[in-house]
Structures are given as structure tokens and as C-alpha cells.
Image (tube, rainbow, N blue to C red):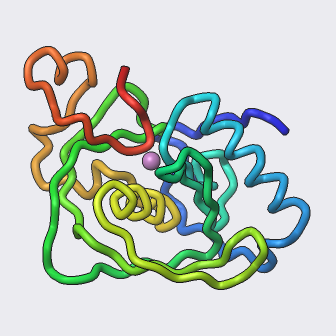
Amino acid sequence: MAILKIAHLGHPVLLQRAEAVADPTAPEMRRLVADMVETLQDIGGLGLAAPQVHVSLRLFIWRTAVGGHSALFNPEIAPLGQETEEAWEGCLSIPGLRGAVQRPARIAFRGQDIAGTWIEGEAAGMAARVMQHEHDHLEGILYPMRMADLSRFGFNEELARFNPPKPVENERQTP
Ligand code: NI
């Protein structure tokens, strides 16, 4: 296992549309997921997409509510209903900053697990937000590109000093 280097804003891999994974059960995919989990645990984050570790493949992982990690290969996401929610998001590829992003409140998702089995489900709240944020990485989209109001974008320390946000965040846990 290894801790992987995170690609930061400005690296072209973050703007590419990632390629489908032909075989999620391949040994190199198992190794990649293990390394991504170790990387996310080391940083203390909630989600990580493969392009963020310089691998342009359709795969992301996230920390589950019970503290484990799940991986989804070749994910597809669709909004459920019209309701949207705004929450503050951060991104391991944009360290130190956060911004308020409006997203669909509920989603349906499908994708392949580490065994290659197609799974599907629905998500709401934090899980829906993390999955949408990570799926965006596979499309070359970063959260500031989703922001309608860039006045609600800034450094964590300054926002915490002047406008304490709700403790809802993606990827990066605030100290
Ligand atoms: Ni991110």
C-alpha cells in the first residue's frame, strides 16, 4: 500500500473526462483502491476520485456512515426530483478553500463494486453530495465550476472567522 500524491487545481488531469474501467476486478484496480483508501485515511477526507491521484479512470471512493470505505467503478448518477440543497464544499485538490454549492438533494446511482458486480441505490444528504462531487471529478468538473455565487468562496480560516459555516463539508474535514 502507498499514500498517493494528490493533483491540485491547475493540473490538467483534473479537467479531463476519465476513461471507463474495463475490469474492476483486475489486480491493479484492487491495489489502486487500497492506495486511495490509505491516502484518504491519511488526509482525513470523505471522498476521493481517481483523477485526483493522477489516474484518469472512472472510479471514486468515499467514507461510509459507519466509518468504512466504499468504491464505485463506472458510476452513473441521476437527480431524483427537483429539490436542491446548498452546502459548503471543500476539495482535496483545492486545499484550504471552500465554497457554497447548490446540488440536487437526492440522487439515484449505479456502478460496479470491487467484485465487478453492478449495484444501484439512492442517496440523500451528505452521501448524495459526496457522490455528486466525486462523480463531477470524473467529468473534469471541480466544485467552483458549479458555484452560482463566487462571493461565497474563500479560505477556510477567513470564512470561519467572519461567517461561520454549517459544519457540512465534502472531502476535507475542517479543523
Ligand atoms: Ni474534490
Residue 12 in sight: no
Q: In front here: 71 or 121?
A: 121
Which residue is painted at 59% across and 78% down in the image?
Answer: 111
Residue at 38% across, 53% down: 142
Residue at 73% over, 54% down:
33
Q: Residue furthest right?
A: 27
- Tell me the quadrant of the picture where the C terminus can be found: top left
Q: Quadrant of the N terminus?
A: top right
Residue 76 horizontal side relative to residue 70, left or right: left
Q: Is residue 48 above or below residue 121?
A: above
Percent from the top left, x then y, of residue 143? 32, 51
In the displayed structure, 148 sits above or below 111; it is above
Residue 38 visible here: yes
Q: Residue at x 9, y 38 (%)?
A: 151
Residue 99's x, y, as percent? 23, 41
Along the horizontal axis of the image, is 1 left or right of 148? Answer: right
Does residue 157 appear left or right of residue 120 in this picture? Answer: left
- Tally of marks: 0
Q: Quadrant of residue 4?
A: top right
Q: Eyeballing the image, is 155 above or below 112?
A: above
Residue 134 at what x, y percent from top left? 47, 58
* Left or right, 47 with reference to 103: right
Question: Residue 87 location in percent, x, y?
Answer: 20, 48
Q: Nearer the viewer, residue 121 or 23?
A: 121
Residue 152's quadrant in the figure?
top left
